[in-house]
Amino acid sequence: MRLIQPELENVCQYRKLTVDWHHGTNGIVGPNGIGKSNLLKAVRFSYTGTFDNHGVKEDNIHWRAGPGATSRVVNRFTHLGHDYELVRYLQGGKSQLRGTGELITGEKNVTGAIEEKLGVSVQAISRHVFVPQRGLSDLIVETPSERAAALARLFGTQKAESVTDLVSKQINQLGKIGVPDAAAIDALERRLADTTMRLREAEAALKLLPVDLEPRLAAARQQLASAGTRAAYTATRDGVLRDLQAVEERVAVAERAAVSAKVHHASYAKVYGEAETQASNARSLLEDAAGARSRNVLRGQVAGAVGRLDAELAQLQAPQCPVLPAGVDPDQFPDEELKRAGLKRDELVARQARYRRLLDSFKGGAVQCPTCGTSVVSLGPTLDEAVAGLPRTESELVACDDYSAQLRQFHQARREFVFRHKQLTEQRRSRAAELDALGPLESTLSAEDEQVAREYLTWYEDLGQKLSAAREGLGRAETAEAHERSTLLTVKHKLQQAEASLAQVPAPDSSVTPQLVAQLETQQREAAGLRATVETLKVQAAPLEGELAGLADARRRGEAERIWLDRLEQLRKLLPRAARRVAEKGLKAVERRANQDLVLFQADFQVRVGPQLSFDAVFADGKVQAAPRLSVGQAALLALAARVALNALYAGIGLLGLDELTEGLDEFHRQEAIGAALGRLRELSLARSLQCLVVTHEQSLAGLFDQVIDLGSLAR
């Protein structure tokens, strides 16, 4: 299989990205965070339909893509002479696989077709074709726990651990099940006999109680309640009679108070009506005098404001410009001159940049220009001009900036002067118009007349307050009278209701006493307790025979489960050995294939599987060293050979993706170790037609690939 071109739309940080693959080694480079791993992850998603440990589809949609936007990965590839276009949607469409004369749609259908056409499962593609970050060295980890976890991931033996856990849980559950013995059965038979005897005793005691107990108790309770009700109604009627007498007395007092309040209010109302006209005249005189005084004060304030504005206009002076030529309009000159100064400054900045680039290019002692290839000897006069002209250009640039600053300062001051002069002129015109509208000074009321008018109004207002108090007193008296009369009607109605209720209650039977009712209630509770006891004993006795039969059946089931428990114990012991056998067989296959690749890589050692399912390196002189103890370069070659072997053994589709080979390595090891390994990988790719996608942020390794895809330059 050969990848041709992926196309990403609204995936991860890519709004739109299209890449053309080389059939050999492809280096995906760029700074951290640019999206190198996400490009490899998107290609893997197109084959597997999942993001594995990188979240669900919704987590990998571009953050700016709306709910209705299309998010998809289009992967074009060839396999066995056929061209295919594989489209996986994160949202906005239905996944499809288009080949020669066929179209397959739907997530499950597309995944099944991929497995059928490539001859490998999507799990194998995820584990052995696309190697994640830090996954290159899974087979050379040091601790047993890390090695066991890595082997389980690589050879898919996690299910054996899950089955072992399920078997252990089943064993624990079966171990808690006991087998009943004969003592338990004897105890259950004694419980059944005791329950039957107590049931017969309760039924005999229930027959001794009266049959008509419930009707007799209900009738006695009704008679006793009727006597209590009649006594309560009689007490209520007597209380209402006492309330009626008290309310009638309060009504008489309220009537006398209302008559007195009416007389008092009428006297004040008569005097207040006679004085109303004179009070209105006095109020008009005072209002006219106050208005005249206010207008006179306002006229003085406006006249003072006009004077202040005249003085401020007289003091306002226009600003002067030291560089303004004679006879030039000060409002037009700064704008035009600023444009000319800006053009001149742009020319100086360009000249300064040209001089600096020329000088910087030859600071390292270069013999020729790195841009055009011209020799230093030919560029000598130009260099001399740059050395002499750079200080002069910088001085002219400073002078130009100072000149522009003076022009802008004058322009701003001139605008402020014009604005302030116009503002003051408009304010003075408005104030002068306001002063003309006020007219001349007006005459006012004398102090003696104003005092007389105020005293009369004070007397009138006091009279009004007394009239209001009399009116409120009259209202309170009338309200109190109405309230008492309403209360009288309510009390009379309550008396009628009490007499009617008393008449409806018949006279009780004197033979029914509280002691008789208590005796009947005791007998009722005793009967209810006996009935409950009978029902409880029946419920307890019913399942005892079934429980006896169940114990015998439980004994038989317990024996059968014991046999099953022994078999599960044997299975729990066999499962770890089976997982180890699978891992050992897989490692042996990897050992044979990896040794072939190590020869191609020109390594100075071969590899073999140790007793702890770990790799040991065997050198030509017979020296044996554990894989985690190898040098960084040797470990890189071994890890790469092992990954290539796993890819060939368990995937074998001619594609290998490696994410961040240089993760965790310093500059020296990236160059020496990973550089040598990538050189060998390039040779292996050519020899075995293995297309490789390698993610790295190390730009210095770009020369080791057949093609370099710089995502940083694409982003720019």
Image (cartoon, rainbow, N blue to C red):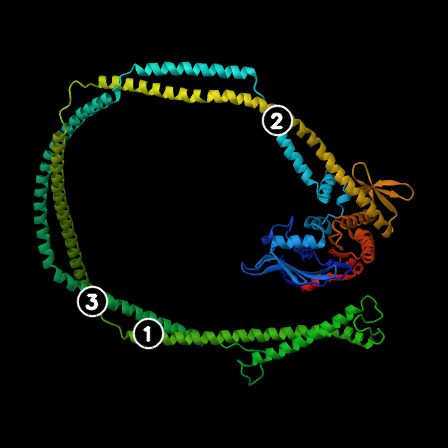
Callout 2, which amino acid?
Answer: Glu
Q: Is 701 in front, or is 251?
A: 701
Q: Is residue 95 above or below residue 529?
A: below
Q: Earlier in the sequence, mark 2 or mark 1?
A: 1
Q: Residue at x 76, y 46 (%)?
A: 137
Callout 3, which amino acid?
Answer: Leu
Give the residue number, with chain letter if any, for mark 1.
434
Asked whether the beta carbons under mark 3 and mark 1 sit within 8 Å of each other, the answer is no
Instruction: Judge depth for marks 2 and 1 and give the one in front.
Output: 2
Percent of width and height locating residue 443: 22, 71
Give the residue number, with chain letter if any, for mark 2.
561
Instruction: Judge depth for marks 2 and 3 and give the one in front.
Output: 2
Residue furthest out toward the bottom: 327
Measure the alpha-carbon separation of dots 2 and 3: 122 Å
Measure the alpha-carbon separation of dots 3 and 1: 25 Å
Give the residue number, with chain letter if any, for mark 3.
445
Q: Earlier in the sequence, mark 2 or mark 3?
A: 3
Percent of width and height locating residue 10: 61, 60
Query: In this figure, what is the number of numbered marks?
Result: 3
Q: Is residue 22 above or below residue 417?
A: above
Q: Residue at x 70, y 29 (%)?
A: 570
Q: Is residue 105 something one can see in this rendering? A: yes
Q: Secondary structure at mark 2?
A: helix
* Label of residue 521 in the image: none
